[in-house]
Amino acid sequence: MTVYIKVEGELDDYRLNEAWQVYSGALTRLDTIAVQAQTMSRAAFDEMMGDPEFDKIELLDPDGNMVGLSTMTTNLAKIPLVSAALFQEKYPEASADGKIMYVPFVAVPDSVQGAFTALIEHVFRQAVAVEGIVSFDACDYNVFQIGFFRAIETWTIKLSAGECSADYLGAQHHIAVDPAGAYGPKKRRLPAGMGARQLRSATAKKEQQS
């Protein structure tokens, strides 16, 4: 299927509702997979869509229906959880020149051939034109299970004929502790007065004896 890119600063009511369907259809599946919320509320989404500092990158099919959506901003203050200081340290010149292009999400709810790569290619070419840096936001599931980082790296290196480089900037990890061992897959309880180290030692001795 042939797809088309359209960039707008503001969406009318019809496009706004269509954009919400594309966005929520693509990302709500992550609500039970990723610890940190991956989807905005409708109110927050509408606020972003109405903010002129975010480019709305729409992917349209031949009939003009939206099949993919992304946004991009060079104002990192618009992304509350992002550390502008990290980008200033790692990319001082691009940061000073306002050339850090932050992409909060890439939403493609259905398997439309070429949709994902079309959105990535559009952002890539914009960055090349100004010698900027593109930063994508993705949860661990998309990075390691779906292969988002590898897909970004592979496609952009192909587009640049090997000149492009991609860096994994890091992640926010969440750790849950079940002190009583009541909810884990193995409800292993320690004898009174025995810590984890003592338990490992006792288990090792038992295995040696057997």
Image: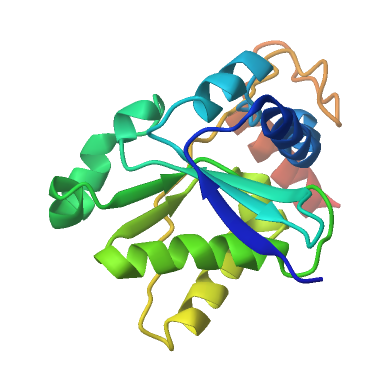
The residue at the point 84 percent across, 59 percent down is: 111
Q: Position of residue 63 (x, y in %)?
A: 82, 56
Of all residues, the one furthest to the bottom in this rendering is 161
Q: Position of residue 51 (x, y in %)?
A: 44, 26
Considering depth in this image, is 52 or 94 the residue closer to the camera? 52
Q: Is residue 16 above or below residue 155?
A: above
Q: Nearer the viewer, residue 176 or 139?
A: 139
Q: x and y percent of residue 195 in the render? A: 62, 22
* Any part of residue 108 in sight: no
57 vs 104, nearest the viewer = 57
Placement of the N terminus among the 4 image quadrants: bottom right
Give whichever of 196, 59 is nearer the camera. Answer: 59
Residue at position x 60%, y 43% from top? 139
Left or right for 32, reference 197: right
Which color scheme did the rendering employ for the protein? rainbow
Residue at 82%, 15% in the rendered image: 182
Residue 118 visible in the shown view: yes
